[in-house]
Image (cartoon, rainbow, N blue to C red):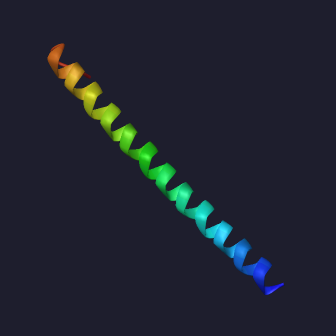
Amino acid sequence: AVYLHIIYNFRKLVILKCKTIFYATCHLSGEVFLLMWMLYGASKGPFY
């Protein structure tokens, strides 16, 4: 029973870690997209 409990907790931790990495990646790609968009807008002239 203890063994199952450890495996369950480990799985939960891994899922949490993956979620964090996933969100960080999404956030980072969002930042890059925003930066590219701003640079693109600046190269096209005044942007709103």
- Residue 40 screen position, x and y as percent: 23, 20
Seen as rendered, the residue at the extreme bottom is: 2
Q: Residue at x 65, y 72 (%)?
A: 10
Q: On the picture, is 28 further left or further right than 11?
A: left
Quadrant in the picture for the C terminus: top left
- Residue 37 screen position, x and y as percent: 29, 25
Exactly how many numbered labels are in the figure? 0
Q: On the picture, is 47 further left or further right than 6?
A: left
- Residue 46 screen position, x and y as percent: 17, 18
For residue 3, what is the image quadrant? bottom right
Q: Residue at x 50, y 58 (%)?
A: 20
For residue 45, what is the image quadrant? top left
- Residue 38 screen position, x and y as percent: 24, 28
Seen as rendered, the residue at the extreme front is: 3
Q: On the picture, is 32 further left or further right than 46?
A: right
Q: Residue at x 79, y 77 (%)?
A: 4
